[in-house]
Image (cartoon, rainbow, N blue to C red):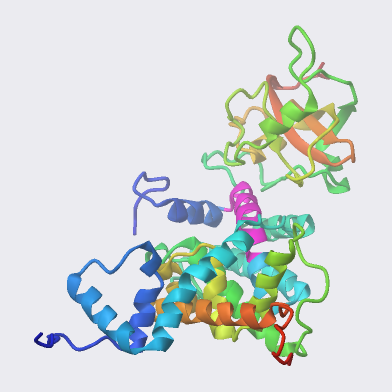
């Protein structure tokens, strides 16, 4: 694309990327403040580890900056996916899917280095959760990561199916069916996690 | 009653799963899709359960989804700003004026900024200076929540502070202090003010808004003070 800078036909994501490539520190700060917390939350729920989330946040934003430098130097990623050396390419999807896709990949890499973490221990980010929210969070932590990541992206972080598809590099149909199955497993997990009601007379408690 | 013969093959569990995600928002639009779906569900308890789970999951997850995200750490933000400066190696101004080679001078509330500040007058300046009661800090905080995309020429430069440093949205600014400082002209240029080539060596004044914790929250330039310095400025 050779449109002049700040052309009105640029999407907001493309315009923001252009500002980043121009070295606009205010644009970077704005992006960090708007997206940083969400990325932190997503990775923390994905990995179960606050430390991993903080490291990944740094990974992602350093990669963003590296991408702006490469783009400025004229490099253009040729391969599919947003990890291409030219950085973000608006033609491939939203900036959101770029960021969450990188966060997910970096998160998985770092998770492999972790000993299996105890689920649900340790301080978490942000606001306190009530019992119900805690229960959902715990149940999410017990899901198979394949399902957990889709539920987190779509139902918790609000990505569209096509954005999740780009972030995860899978077809949209797969996002949909995995999301459906993930939700179903979540519901099963919630029922089995729920404290048992007092058994009726004659029923054996397990 | 004659048995109904399906013309299209019944949906598979995989297809049903892909449709199930949105079923609570309404059945599939195409009657054929609806028919094959229903035919499948009649004979597949697992998929019936899957469909039922969608609504339950949405309700349960919805509350967690409404919890706002945490604030990202300030230390990393500062590190990233440095990195961006090093990487792109150019001043962030859109205008093609090259003021000085000092690219991307960001005024942060740190010792590193000291070299930009030529003189500090810790006067207690009422933010609006107008008649009546001074603007309470909480209203200045409203100003700070303007999008940072408003570069130096933000609406009403005489009133609004540009956010700098770290603003924790969840901790309201109860009390604030405004300090007037005098800066080199290139500091203003770094924030996008059109500083013309005859201004190098010139001085500008700005006001910095400090929270009670001593951290700088906002910056506003005072364009009325922009002028070429020959001698000491007022």
Residue drawn where x is 52% and y is 39% of the image: B95
- Residue A132 horizontal/vertical position (percent): 69, 65
Residue numbers of the magenta segment: A23-39
- Name the residue nearer the viewer: A154 or A86: A154
Query: In the rendered image, which quarter is residue A141 located in?
Result: bottom right
Query: In the rendered image, which quarter is residue A114 located in?
Result: bottom right
- Name the residue nearer the viewer: A95 or B37: B37
Vertical comparison of A193 with B233: above or below: below
- Name the residue nearer the viewer: A46 or A201: A201
The extreme front residue here reads A201
The extreme left residue here reads B2
Q: Is residue A80 left or right of residue B214?
A: left
Majority secondary structure in the magenta region: helix
Tell me if residue A24 is in the magenta stretch.
yes
- Residue A202 horizontal/vertical position (percent): 70, 90
Q: Can residue A52 be seen at all in this image of the molecule?
A: yes
Residue drawn where x is 76% and y is 29% of the image: B138
- Residue B89 horizontal/vertical position (percent): 63, 56
- Name the residue nearer the viewer: B129 or A114: A114
Q: Can residue A44 be seen at all in this image of the molecule?
A: no
Tell me if residue A104 is in the magenta stretch.
no
Query: In the rendered image, which quarter is residue A78 located in?
Result: bottom left
Q: Is residue A180 left or right of residue A195?
A: left
| The N terminus of chain B sits in image quarter | bottom left
Residue drawn where x is 44% and y is 73% of the image: A166
- Residue B128 horizontal/vertical position (percent): 74, 17
| The C terminus of chain B sits in image quarter | top right
């Amino acid at each position: 694309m050779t449109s002049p800078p700040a052309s009105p036909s640029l999407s907001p994501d493309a315009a923001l990327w252009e500002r980043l490539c121009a070295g606009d520190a205010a644009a970077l700060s704005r992006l960090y403040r708007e997206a940083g917390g969400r990325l932190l939350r997503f990775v923390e729920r994905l990995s179960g580890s606050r430390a991993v989330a903080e490291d990944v946040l740094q990974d992602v934003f350093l990669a963003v900056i590296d991408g702006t430098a490469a783009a400025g130097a004229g490099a253009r990623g040729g391969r599919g996916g947003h990890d291409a050396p030219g950085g973000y390419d608006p033609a491939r999807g939203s900036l959101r899917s770029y960021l969450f896709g990188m966060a997910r990949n970096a998160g998985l890499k770092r998770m492999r280095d972790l000993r299996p973490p105890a689920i649900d221990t340790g301080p978490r980010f942000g606001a306190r959760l009530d019992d119900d929210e805690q229960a959902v969070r715990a149940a999410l932590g017990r899901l198979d990561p394949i399902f957990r990541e889709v539920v987190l992206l779509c139902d918790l972080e609000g990505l569209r199916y096509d954005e999740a598809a780009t972030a995860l590099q899978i077809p949209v149909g797969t996002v949909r069916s995995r999301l459906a199955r993930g939700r179903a497993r979540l519901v099963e997990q919630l029922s089995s996690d729920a404290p048992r009601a007092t058994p009726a007379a004659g029923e054996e408690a397990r | 009653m004659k048995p109904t013969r399906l013309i299209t093959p019944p949906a598979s569990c995989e297809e049903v799963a892909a449709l199930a995600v949105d079923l609570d928002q309404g059945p599939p639009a195409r009657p054929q899709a609806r028919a094959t779906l229903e035919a499948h569900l009649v004979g597949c308890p697992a998929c019936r359960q899957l469909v039922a789970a969608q609504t339950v999951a949405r309700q349960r997850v919805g509350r967690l989804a409404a919890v706002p995200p945490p604030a990202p750490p300030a230390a990393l933000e500062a590190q990233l700003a440095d990195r961006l400066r090093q990487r792109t190696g150019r001043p962030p101004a859109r205008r093609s004026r090259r003021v000085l080679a000092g690219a991307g001078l960001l005024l942060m509330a740190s010792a590193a900024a000291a070299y930009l500040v030529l003189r500090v007058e810790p006067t207690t300046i009422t933010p609006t200076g107008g008649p009546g009661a001074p603007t309470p800090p909480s209203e200045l905080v409203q100003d700070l929540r303007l999008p940072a995309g408003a570069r130096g020429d933000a609406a009403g430069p005489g009133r609004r502070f540009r956010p700098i440093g770290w603003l924790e949205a969840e901790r309201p600014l109860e009390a604030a202090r405004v300090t007037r400082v005098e800066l080199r002209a290139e500091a203003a240029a770094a924030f996008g003010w059109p500083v013309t080539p005859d201004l190098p060596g010139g001085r500008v004044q700005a006001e910095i808004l400090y929270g009670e914790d001593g951290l700088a929250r906002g910056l506003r330039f005072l364009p009325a003070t922009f002028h070429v310095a020959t001698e000491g400025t007022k």
